[in-house]
């Protein structure tokens, strides 16, 4: 289960709520395959379904967890990442146990990768955050940035350098390097870079960071599957601690010689304190769709209320509200996007102030043929895997 802390940074927007109307699908000869959707259920199981354009799906097939434990230990899946060609799927498996006092104790984790056509699976014992795939190479972050090497046996190898990785792109990682300005400097400088596995750096932009809590270095950002667009969040990234104004967003063109930067600004108002929870790209033009959340508010008793999530998009120079109860979103290049309804709830007995996403109703498929509920899908995380013309993989 994906969990976001209010206090610990890096582990891991306000508007008028409008009703979402499901447009009736136009008459067509037959529904067409959209693709295969992998999703983590509310209890941490990884399932996959084949999706048709009219919202019908196959029965869910279980892919994970693959780690076997005995009670009272449990294993949950989180951190889904997929290669650009949809051939490889990666995830993390968290092992935990609940004590008699109700406190959840984490006992370790595994990094898992699966080839989606032949079903071959590799497991590495590692406490790491999955960043994404550079080509077919899985990249993780944590104390160090590492890449998964499959031979002679699967293991993680450290990537040279100590810059903070925020995303992967086809040839390596997107990272942020702090540029020391001296102890008396009033501002910080942070370089956003493309860094190959061979150690070659291309600086996209140097940010001047004041006292606005809008650093670029402590977050997982996103690169479009075709490798053409990078989305960067600029925020304080202590997600549920409420520090600083709403996050700003930039995009960069990764295929142009100039790596043109486009300032998207923020959704809603500064004081709403919107933060990024999930990001995806929709359609041939890579329109950004974001699942965002605000900072939690305290009740009179001192407890925190649940946090509402929104799904928004940015197109033609403006933000648009797409769903006012969204916790996760997954789009593809054919213009189909799945939005998961839900909210963020405080984790009981959590001293670290953690929040977890909780699905509400069924996920909603939106696309060229209108909107349709996927009545076998409720997930905390969603990714498109396996091309539509391929057979769904066999499960565990």
Image (cartoon, rainbow, N blue to C red):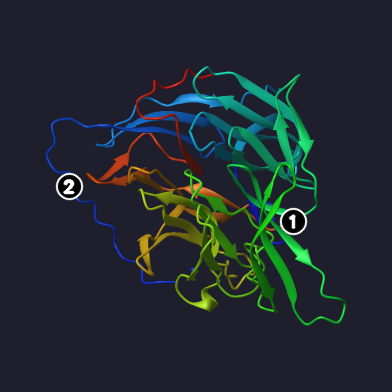
Q: Residue furthest front?
A: 257
* Location of residue 361 in the rendering, given as x and y in whole percent from the top left corner: 38, 46
Q: Which residue is mark 2?
A: 24
Query: Within the image, what quadrant is residue 2 found in?
Result: top right
Q: Quadrant of the C terminus?
A: top right
Give the class, few, some or many, for how many residues have Cα within 10 Å of label 2's Cα (few <14, many ≥20): few
Q: Are marks 1 and 2 in contact (CB under 8 Å)?
A: no
Seen in the picture, residue 59 relative to 248 is either above or below; the reply is above
Q: Tell me the residue at 46%/70% (across/down).
A: 267
> Does residue 96 appear anywhere in the picture?
no
Left or right: 17 in relation to 384: left
* Location of residue 198 in the rendering, given as x and y in whole percent from the top left corner: 73, 42
Seen in the picture, residue 241 relative to 141 is either above or below; the reply is below
Seen in the picture, residue 219 relative to 242 is either above or below; the reply is above
Query: Foreground mark, 1 or 2?
Result: 2
Query: Within the image, what quadrant is residue 185 found in?
Result: bottom right
Element at badge 2? loop
Give the class, few, some or many, for how many residues have Cα within 10 Å of label 1's Cα (few <14, many ≥20): few
- Nearest the viewer among 22 and 200 is 200
Left or right: 395 in relation to 66: left
Q: Could you say which disc has been placed on residue 279 in the image?
A: none
Element at badge 1? loop
Left or right: 307 in relation to 371: right
Q: Tell me the residue at 22%/44% (across/down).
A: 369
* Location of residue 192 in the rendering, given as x and y in whole percent from the top left corner: 66, 61
Q: Between marks 1 and 2, how big is the CA–CA gap?
A: 47 Å
Q: Tell me the residue at 68%/21% (across/down).
A: 68
Q: Could you say which disc has been placed on residue 351 in the image?
A: 1
């Amino acid at each position: 289960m994906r969990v976001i802390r209010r206090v610990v940074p890096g582990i891991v927007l306000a508007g008028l709520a409008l009703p979402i109307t499901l447009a009736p699908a136009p008459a067509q000869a037959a529904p067409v395959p959209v693709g295969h959707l992998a999703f983590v259920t509310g209890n941490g199981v990884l399932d996959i379904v084949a999706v048709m354009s009219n919202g019908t799906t196959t029965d869910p097939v279980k892919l994970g967890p693959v780690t076997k434990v005995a009670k009272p230990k449990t294993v949950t899946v989180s951190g889904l990442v997929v290669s650009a060609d949809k051939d490889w799927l990666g995830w993390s498996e968290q092992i935990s146990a609940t004590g008699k006092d109700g406190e959840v104790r984490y006992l370790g984790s595994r990094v898992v990768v699966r080839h989606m056509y032949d079903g071959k699976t590799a497991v590495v014992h590692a406490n790491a955050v999955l960043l994404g795939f550079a080509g077919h190479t899985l990249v993780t972050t944590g104390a160090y940035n590492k890449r998964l090497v499959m031979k002679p046996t699967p293991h993680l190898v450290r990537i040279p350098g100590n810059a903070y990785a925020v995303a992967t792109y086809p040839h390596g990682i997107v990272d942020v390097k702090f540029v020391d300005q001296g102890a008396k400097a009033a501002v910080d400088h942070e370089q956003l870079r493309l860094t190959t596995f061979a150690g070659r750096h291309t600086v996209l932009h140097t940010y001047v960071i004041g006292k606005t809590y809008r650093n670029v270095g402590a977050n997982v950002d996103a690169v479009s599957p075709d490798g053409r667009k990078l989305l960067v969040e600029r925020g304080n990234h202590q997600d549920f601690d409420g520090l600083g104004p709403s996050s700003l967003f930039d995009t960069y063109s990764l295929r142009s010689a100039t790596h043109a930067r486009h300032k998207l600004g923020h959704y809603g108002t500064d004081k709403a304190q919107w933060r990024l929870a999930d990001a995806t790209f929709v359609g041939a033009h890579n329109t950004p769709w974001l699942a965002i959340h605000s900072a939690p508010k305290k009740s009179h008793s001192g407890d925190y209320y649940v946090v509402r999530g929104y799904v928004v998009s940015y197109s033609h120079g403006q933000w648009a509200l797409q769903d006012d109860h969204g916790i996760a979103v997954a789009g593809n290049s054919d213009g189909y996007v799945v939005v998961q309804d839900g909210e963020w709830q405080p984790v009981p007995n959590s001293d670290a102030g953690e929040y977890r996403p909780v699905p509400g109703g069924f996920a909603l498929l939106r696309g060229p043929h209108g909107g349709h509920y996927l009545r076998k899908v409720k997930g905390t995380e969603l990714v498109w895997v396996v091309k539509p013309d391929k057979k769904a993989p066999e499960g565990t």
